Amino acid sequence: MEKILELISREVEEAFAANGYDRKYGRVTLSNRPDLCEYQCNGAMAAAKEYKCAPFVIADKVAESLSGNEMFASAESVKPGFLNLKLDAEYLAGYLRQMSVDEERLGCEKSQAPKTIMIDYGGPNVAKPLHVGHLRSAIIGESVKRIGRFMGHTMIGDVHLGDWGLQMGLIITELKERKPDLVYFQEDYEGAYPEDAPFTISELEEIYPTASAKSKEDENYKEAAMQATYELQHGRKGYQALLSHILNVSVSDLKRNYENLNVSFELWKGESDAQPFIPDMVQKMKDDGFAHMSEGALVVDVKEETDTKEIPPCMILKSDGASLYNTTDLATIVWRIRDYHPDEIIYVVDKRQELYFTQVFRCARKTGLVGPETELKFLGFGTMNGKDGKPFKTREGGVMRLEYLVNEINEEMYKKISDNHTVEEEEGRKTAKMVALSAIKYGDLSNQAAKDYIFDVERFTSFEGNTGPYILYTIVRIKSILKKYQEQKALPQGAKILAAHSGSEKALMLEISKFNSVMESAFADTAPHKVCAYIYDLANAFNHFYHETKILAEQDEGVQAGYICLLELTKRALEICIEVLGFDAPEKM
Ligand code: ARG
């Protein structure tokens, strides 16, 4: 379906043309004075310059041409030359009826030119527990992915595990200290390695920080860890067997955590998967004359003339020949392009890594790893702060584990829900989990990604205000009205959305009609917060209508059936939106 603003604009453009003015002046926008009108066109002001006359002369003529047009209830020319527009209620109803027919997409067309888009998000590190810093990447990335998919693109999410580097050597070193007799450490061992890992996830999560702390104090220990890392990366069999245990144990724990967040990935690739591509890549960069030695390291210059700040060279190999985070990211681009030919790769990473990604992207372009047909996009997010404005911590001041945070909020929600009314324990827990997830995700997504925000549990879990629970509460309210209606009667044949009977009904209808344009721009700007803003307005408009309107007590069956159809559509719009944001609504709460 065409966007309603397009339809309106076209009509107004016609009217400009009919009066001999360039149609380009007929662009219509949403009104910034909703008290005066619903849409507005300021084109006459600009046209006045070209046609050298007073703007209101033009606006008057256009308004005159629009009078009697069935799209508008009114088209007024207002001095000095604005056009104030109100939609005809029947026209609006017709637009919504057309949306309703398409239950899946509500008339939002898929992209005409579907792309393959890879999205790099999550970015957890193996053997380290997920902390809140990873939360934003997971939440935002998942939503961007779902929005893209809704718009018809092929979206491939890759978790890009941090599974390479010193942390592996540290774990191996610590294990060796604790259990030196394990076969993994026998260099001459020829047999098969055991299938079961020699540690559990909780041991693993304790081993890593212990090892990391030791290495900071003990030079020899650190040396040993670096040696172990080196041997692992150069194919020592026992260590590689340990690595796959670490990966398996860690990944199944990560999957469980992400599942609780309603987050999933198409690819579970890691930094280690990029390693085989490094030697050829580096060789080519050298052969092509892009990489050169600088202070012992191999680098590619990436500064550009127009830079206003210093962009340091992209380091490809350290002086000891070891690869770096950069090298891995570049080599990851190699297989991503080779295997998926993406039109775009989006990185959802902490914005503090922006400069780093500028270097990586420039290097990838300059050295020809990426052609002009592939766009590289950095979607940097801000920090999640506590109420004190500092990065979110536990009460004791430690790093907050994601799992604990989620459990805490689940618990909080369960208390709220069971305080409100009696619920079966199991049912209540399930509902609490859904509502809690909406609180966390909406609390995050409703902010522009790049901004820091304050994670305020109390505010986020509130059933009032701009929160996830408020949105769910609204959906549940609609579901309950629909259910009550259905218990009383069946929707009559031919029931349909009718022209609005009241201001609040029309306001709700106007909100709904924005659906396709919101989805399109949320995708174009990789901006889930636009979907949040839309459903907040929509929920408000609905609740306003609901408070002013007797729906179930309406006497006129036709009018009532029209309301029910409108409620169905409102519910669908809200549901599709929360689906792309990555959470669901319960049946009741
Ligand atoms: N593992 C990294 C971290 O915890 C994030 C990875 C981001 N993605 C990337 N392609 N570098 O900071």
Image (spheres, helix red, strand yellow):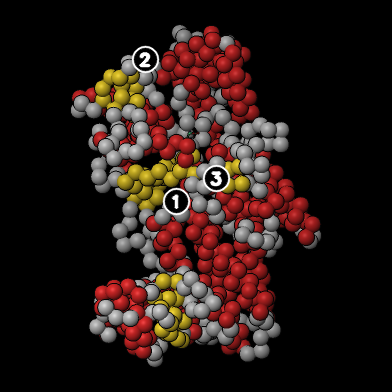
Q: Is residue 506 above or below residue 556?
A: above
Q: Amino acid at mark 2?
A: Asp
* Quadrant of the rendered image containing residue 389: top right
Q: Secondary structure at mark 1?
A: helix
Q: Secondary structure at mark 2?
A: loop
Quarter placement of the C terminus: bottom right
Of 182 and 483, which appears nearest the observer? 483
Residues packed near mark 3 inside 10 Å, few (<14), some (14 to 19) or many (20 plus): some
- Marks 3 and 2 sit apart, C-alpha to C-alpha, by 38 Å
Name the residue at 56% across, 15% down: 215
Give the side of residue 187 with respect to residue 390, left or right. Answer: left
Quarter placement of the N terminus: bottom left
Name the residue at 62% across, 39% down: 390
First-in-chain label (3 vs 2):
2
Q: Secondary structure at mark 3?
A: loop
* Quadrant of the rendered image containing residue 209: top right
Q: Is residue 224 above or below residue 514?
A: above
Q: Position of residue 162 (x, y in %)?
A: 47, 31
Frontmost of labels 3 and 2 is 3
Of 513 and 430, which appears nearest the observer? 513
> Which residue lies under the disc numbered 3?
452
> Which residue lies under the disc numbered 1?
145
- Marks 1 and 2 sit apart, C-alpha to C-alpha, by 39 Å
Frontmost of labels 3 and 1 is 3
> Which residue lies under the disc numbered 2?
320
Q: CB of mark 3 within 8 Å of CB of mark 1?
A: no
Residues packed near mark 2 inside 10 Å, few (<14), some (14 to 19) or many (20 plus): few
Q: CB of mark 3 within 8 Å of CB of mark 2?
A: no
Name the residue at 53% across, 61% down: 533
